[in-house]
Amino acid sequence: MLHASDSLDAARLGPRLQSRELRPSEVAAAVLARIAARGDDKVFIHRVGEDELLARAAELERRAAHDLPLYGLPFAIKDNIDLAGHPTSAGCPDFTYVAQTSAPVVARLLAAGAMAVGKTNLDQFATGLVGTRSPYGICTNPFDRRYIAGGSSSGSAVAVAAGLVTFALGTDTAGSGRIPAAFNNIVGLKPTRGLLSARGVVPACRSLDCVSIFALTADDAGRVLRVARGFDADDPFSRAETPARLPASLAGCRIGVPRAAQLTFFGNADAAALFAATVARLEALGATTVAIDLAPFLAAARLLYDGPWIAERYLAVRDLLENSPQALMAITRDIIRAGAAPSAAELFQAYYRLKELRRAAASVWEAIDVLLTPTAGTIYRIDEVLAEPQLLNSRLGTYTNFVNLMDLSAIAVPAGLQGDGLPFGVTLLAPAFAEDGLIPLADAVHRSAAVRLGATPAPLPPLRAARAPLGDEIPLAVCGAHMSGLPLNGELTARGGRLVRRGRTAASYRLFALEQFAPPRPGLLRAHAGSAIEVEIWVLPPRGFATLVAAVPAPLGVGSIELEGGESISGFLCESYAVAAAPEITALGGWRAYLLGKTA
């Protein structure tokens, strides 16, 4: 049974479904009850019927759960993305049509066992970052109904934050997959342009549009991404991946932070303090912060609405705008109509300028691994946005508008609560196709903030559950120079390794310093009378694991290590003859403590 207080995050819900402790039909019934309890909250424009949802759950119960990575997980879909047999409105009643087929990204999720619950509210034609531009009503912030939920993917974000679904799809052209994440205390993953198929999505700016993922945790977003990604030959904007590598942990990661003079919070002192506190926490976790010049990025941001890219929005709805202008809300109509004005010459001029700005930004990426910015400088009340719709919308895009133009990957994560209880978030950005590296870093940033999941009372799931090995990855315990931030860590990351958790061995090991190696390494021995030793648990793909083991020099080797709690996994050990003349450092509890003692 799924209780009203139970979290729907995949780390907790997934194992219960996979083990058959919980059935998809029970999840479906609980989701329907939660939606009913919220009443007319303007989250959904269209919902899958109860009979259809329960039939889908029953179908899943007849299948093998272990073959379906998203088995029984409920999700919502922004209503500019097609779901077969259901209407797509893009937030405009006169535009509505019934989709004959599901968008490929939706089809992949359904094939993986997820259950579609409904289509969510949005700023009309995804034009806005505020969530107030919908004829279906304003979807309000679950932390304070006076405040905006953010847009354009407002309904998708609130559905996740309120605990109605495990994850939701949004879209992101200028920040629509990140601003709502910040305002709802959830994670918003904006993949690289073309990583997820955009076929079956009502376009805003086709050359910039991305399907985005909202989830309660970075790990949940990664779980969905693994299923949803993939080249689509029928989408002319789809791209084959060229993976970019990032450091496996915050320790030793070079994080770019905008110069103080380039940060603006529009008078929100709480937001400024929370951003500064986030930077301090990351430094305490071993990251190196680098002050960078944000000017090329900010200049690119201005091109999005002040330049000719607005013409793409006009092209997307030109027929409706010219033939039935009254079908659009006034604010949407005014913004999109401006897209008829730019000339071809202006387009090329702006394109040349963008290439210059990308080249200028290249030097920034040589100095950093990841860029950290506020997701938004502040949050506004609904009445404030209605009074100043374009000015305040523009302010919200300060740190988001440039991202797709600059061809970056991004993930927005919670970073604390303001004094008034409203959420604040930060965004980690990296070059294209760096999602697999960004997700664990984002998880670490999220955990450092120690906030609850969305607007629910649930805390983050334990790291062990959230970052379990995937598929055929092989776990490996390391206790010395291979640990994050230490000299041999690159031997793991170069082989596709990633850190999943930190822990200790069982209290039956002795540790020695093998100083004959360059760099020095520890020698770990099993003993009848020993202590618990600090370790990091990494996972590697099978080929990476095999080549690492083959390269380990004698007298070191890889054998079975018992962890605290009784789990046994592979790990670095040492032959006993090699420690005869080596200093014993067992009492220090780990290699890092030994290194600290040497430098003290």
Image: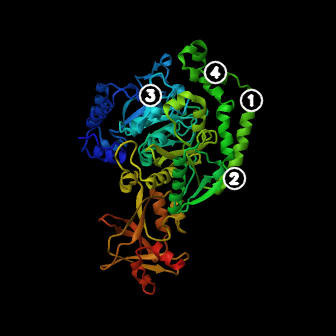
**Which dot, 2 or 3, sits closer to the camera?**
2
Mark identifier at residue 363: 2
Please name the residue that numbered disc 1 is placed on: 346
Instruction: For mark 4, give the secondary structure.
Output: helix
Mark identifier at residue 280: none
What crowding class fits label 1: few (fewer than 14 Cα within 10 Å), some (14-19), or many (20 or more)?
some
Please name the residue that numbered disc 4 is placed on: 337
Residue type at numbered disc 1: Glu
* Residue at the image position 72 percent from the left and 34 percent from the top: 350
What crowding class fits label 4: few (fewer than 14 Cα within 10 Å), some (14-19), or many (20 or more)?
some
Residue 231's spot in the image, x, y percent?
Answer: 53, 38
Q: For marks 2 and 4, give the CA distance.
A: 37 Å
Mark identifier at residue 102: 3
Q: For marks 3 and 4, give the CA distance.
A: 30 Å
Numbered marks: total: 4
* Residue at the image position 48 percent from the left and 53 percent from the top: 445
**Which dot, 3 or 4, sits closer to the camera?**
4
Residue 54's spot in the image, x, y percent?
Answer: 28, 30
* Residue at the image position 54 percent from the left and 77 percent from the top: 599
Q: Earlier in the sequence, mark 2 or mark 3?
A: 3
Residue type at numbered disc 3: Ser
Q: For marks 1 and 3, give the CA distance.
A: 37 Å
Q: Earlier in the sequence, mark 4 or mark 1?
A: 4
What crowding class fits label 2: few (fewer than 14 Cα within 10 Å), some (14-19), or many (20 or more)?
few
Q: Earlier in the sequence, mark 2 or mark 4?
A: 4
* Residue at the image position 34 percent from the left and 67 percent from the top: 563
Instruction: For mark 3, give the secondary structure.
Output: loop
- Residues 97 and 497: in front is 97
